[in-house]
Amino acid sequence: MTEFTRRNMLAAAGALGGATLALPALATQAPASGLNAAAKAKGMRFGSCTSWAAPGADAGSFNNPAYAALLERDCGILVAENEMKWQALRPDAKTFNVERFADMLDFAEAKGMAMRGHTLLWHKTQYFPKWLNQHDFGATPAREAERILTQHIKTVCKLYGDRVTSFDVVNETVDEKTGKQRESSLSKAWGSADAMVDHAFHTARAHAPKAELVYNDYMSWEPGNERHRAGVLTLLEGFRKRGVPCDALGVQSHIGLTAGGTVGALVSKQEKPWRAFLDAVVAMGYRLVVTEFDVNDKALPTDTKIRDGIVANYAAAYLDILFSYPQLKDVLAWGMSDKYTWLNGFTPRADKTRQRATPYDDGFKSKALYTAIRQAFEAAPMRS
């Protein structure tokens, strides 16, 4: 069987439309040592999101034995897909439903895995619970908004600050179209999105002093992300000027391809501005975390061999760039199997086939993307 290598496939990659590519055969059996073992050999760590479901349910959950087996083989760190978000934790103003996240954390610790916390503040009105968007902030709205946010972050961090190694304190506060901070029901009551976001980080530091504090966003390397990247840099620069305790940028890494051109041409066009962005981030003293990696193949041909090869090529080029930064140690996928990827519902393919966005197919067999990730770790510089 021909060995898959990142460089020779990138060189051989043809059109992203319907043209046939000459791709080598690819193994479908994952090595027993797994992706985290490959990462660990370079001082890095690999992991994935997972979700809560009833034991035995057909879901991307640690309670699904078949899926849990993937997590155990390949992961050294987990993150909750939804169970720490406000909508899951806070059904009303007085309640914290932590049981599902607690179950997940217990599983991770029992298997020797670390845990990330996602997220203490997802700054989009549509992802706040209904009660918060309808809340009467009263005669002193800024004070009431501060009380609500402080209570939420303090409660979660006091419960889990010693067990969760890294928190996405704020998620997606930069509007990708304007490059400016979003407004929400909470920030409008507060009177300043800057002040609200700063307060979130200071509160997290006070109550989870040992945890890594992360700003997480989906700015990417594809064309059209220029304003989003600039806005994130402005936010991070402001943090440094104001002494905000943010340790790292979470690079979500929901990457994807459009039809037409070649992988090589796309990478050649995208690498320079992407490196300039990453260079600016690390120059400010921030670490990097890949928090939600997957590859959207919506625009690619139906043929799975062609599709898998293109996805693997594209991912390999992307990971090579990121892995060249020693400030990056943790790399998490947004799911391990195509069967459960969020992309199937969020951005379905026109041909009705499943997106092949993750390391394993819907039968839990490893794909070219798995091999690309593993070889990216093997080629990465050693972390100190």
Image (cartoon, rainbow, N blue to C red):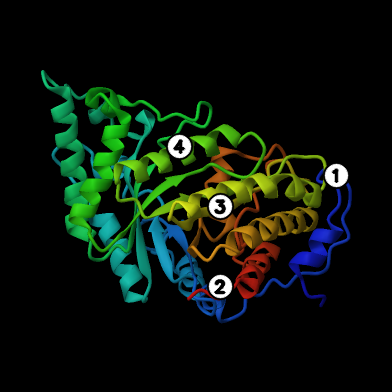
* For marks 1 and 2 on the same chain, the one whose residue lies earlier in the sequence: 1
**Do residues under tags 1 and 3 come within 8 Å of each other at their CB atoms?**
no
Distance in Å between CA atoms under marks 1 and 4? 40 Å
Q: Tell which circle, 3 or 4, labels the residue nearer the N-terminal end.
A: 4
Q: CA distance from mark 4 to mark 2?
A: 34 Å
The one nearer the camera, 90 or 45, is: 45
| Picture residue at 27% right of the left edge, 28% below the top | 186
Tell me the amino acid under the disc marked 3: Asp
Q: Which residue is mark 4?
A: 234
Quarter of the view holding residue 136: top left
Pinpoint residue 276: horizontal percent, then vertical percent: 61, 48
Mark 1 or mark 3, which is nearer to you?
Answer: 3
Q: Secondary structure at mark 3?
A: helix
Residue pictured at 12% horizontal, 20% vertical: 138
On the image, the x and y values in percent for residue 299 come to: 72, 41
Residue for badge 1: 18
Distance CA(mark 3)–CA(mark 2): 27 Å
The answer to which image quadrant residue 165 occupies is bottom left
Q: In which quadrant of the rendered image does the N terminus lie?
A: bottom right
